[in-house]
Amino acid sequence: MKEGITGLIDNIIQGPQDIREAAACALSRIGEPAIDPLLTLLGNKDNQIRKSAVTALGEIGEKRLIEHLLPLISDMDDGVREQVAHALGKIGDVKAIGPLTGLFRDRNVSIRIASVDAISRIGNPAVDTLIRLLGDPNESVRESSAHALGKIGDEKATGPLLQLLSDRNIYVRMAAAQALSKIGEPAIGPLIALLSDKNDAVRESAVYALGEMADMRSVPHIIKLVTDSHAFVRMAAAHALGKIGDTRAVDPIIRLAKDRNVFVRMAAAHALGKIGGVNAIEPLLALLSDDNLFVRMAAANAFNKLGQMALEPILRLLASNDATVRRAAAQALGKIGDERAITPLILSLWDENEEVLIAAGEALEKIDPYWYARDATRQYLPYFSEALKKGGKHVKLYFIGILEKIGELGISDIDVADILKDYIKDEDKNIRLSTALALEKIKKNAR
């Protein structure tokens, strides 16, 4: 065994990264006999060698190793410090509490995350120290302490974490809110009470925490905040109601879909997509035409989530008197992707509004790039010449492209060249060029 250990130690010292990692793993499985040889590597000048040794020792996990690992918590190398934090967490000795909380001040966020994870493994013995650090002047320390308390989940931390919801730093507030959501039941009542706090940051954080907890009891209280004077509180309310998923929230969220604030409308779109229901469809269609790109994207993603339940109501909206609604309905059908929408969308290609026609064409492409080759849709192909005559430049270019593809496929039901020949002399040079290229491709395919 001694020779085997020596060989593995040599692999850590001399081998490439993958060999080094495999050797460290093998030594950790050997356990006690490998400890002393590994300890000799902790003083090595090479960062990767020290890191591999710390990894193996952490996996072995004997309590006596803590005295050897603690000095490396201030190692110059980030990777070594991070691995020391992981190792101390696996060993789980209370002696590591102080040094690990010291890493909450580290400039490297990965090391802070590792130290939070490590101290949460130690658990309840660390709670008093962590509660005390919630008042530390350093924002990273407060944030990390809150995260650690959330992972441990001791309800003793509820009161101090509630106080942290008014912290001046948003990341600290969010960490406290997340921690309270993990503590659960003991925090629900106090959080609901804070929804009426004078401080808007406290209300926002309390709503966030209640949303993470997804407790139905909080819904009536959160609904009251959809009329809050602060936009970020309204946004948090929409997010929370969407997470909880109670249908009682649909009408209040619909009101938020018309909010003057972009972020609130985005949150409302996400929430409506999660809760669903027929009542959510028209507000989401309206958001598809929002002035803001990110609101439109949120609404489109919401339709992805609504899926099949939204199909029939949206198909009916293709016949709306409002062109904006018809266009949004076509866009939504493209997002849903159901083949049952193909025929209604083909009929929308003759819409008097050019934007509706283009939206219908794009939706068809998303549902099936070869929709025009389906047996059930060929009956409509001869009428494309009518659409070409009625349409503007973009409509003509769209239909020329479709007719080109039909001609290349050699679909015999329609004489594509005969339809296109009239546009070789169109007044628009782009249409003339597109027509010429289409006819050339069709001619080549026919040879």
Image (cartoon, rainbow, N blue to C red):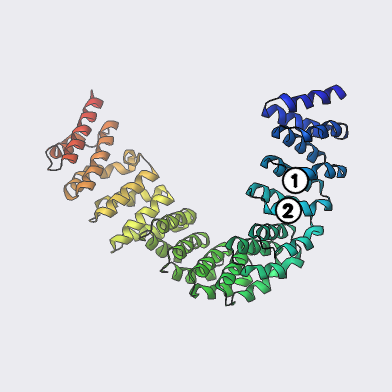
Q: Is residue 206 above or below residue 106?
A: below
Helix, strand, or loop for circle 1?
Answer: helix
**Foreground pick, 377 / 320:** 320
Q: Picture quarter containing residue 219?
A: bottom right
How many numbered marks have been drawn onto this rendered protein structure? 2
Q: Picture quarter containing residue 383?
A: top left
Residue type marked 1: Ile
Residue type marked 2: Gly
Tag shown at residue 102: 2
At which x and y percent is residue 83?
72, 42
Distance of label 2 from label 1 (alpha carbons):
9 Å
Q: Which quadrant of the figure contains the C terminus?
A: top left
State the residue at coordinates (60%, 60%). Answer: 171
Q: Is residue 345 above or below residue 26?
A: below
Q: Which quadrant of the figure contains the N terminus?
A: top right
At which x and y percent is residue 154?
76, 63
At which x and y percent is residue 27?
80, 31
Tag shown at residue 73: 1
**Foreground pick, 431 / 342:** 431
Tag shown at residue 147: none
Q: Is residue 1 visible?
A: no
Horizontal relation, residue 66 to residue 215: left or right: right
Q: Picture quarter containing residue 320?
A: bottom left
State the residue at coordinates (27%, 50%). Answer: 349
Helix, strand, or loop for circle 2?
Answer: helix
Image marks 2 and 1: residues in contact by CB distance under 8 Å? yes
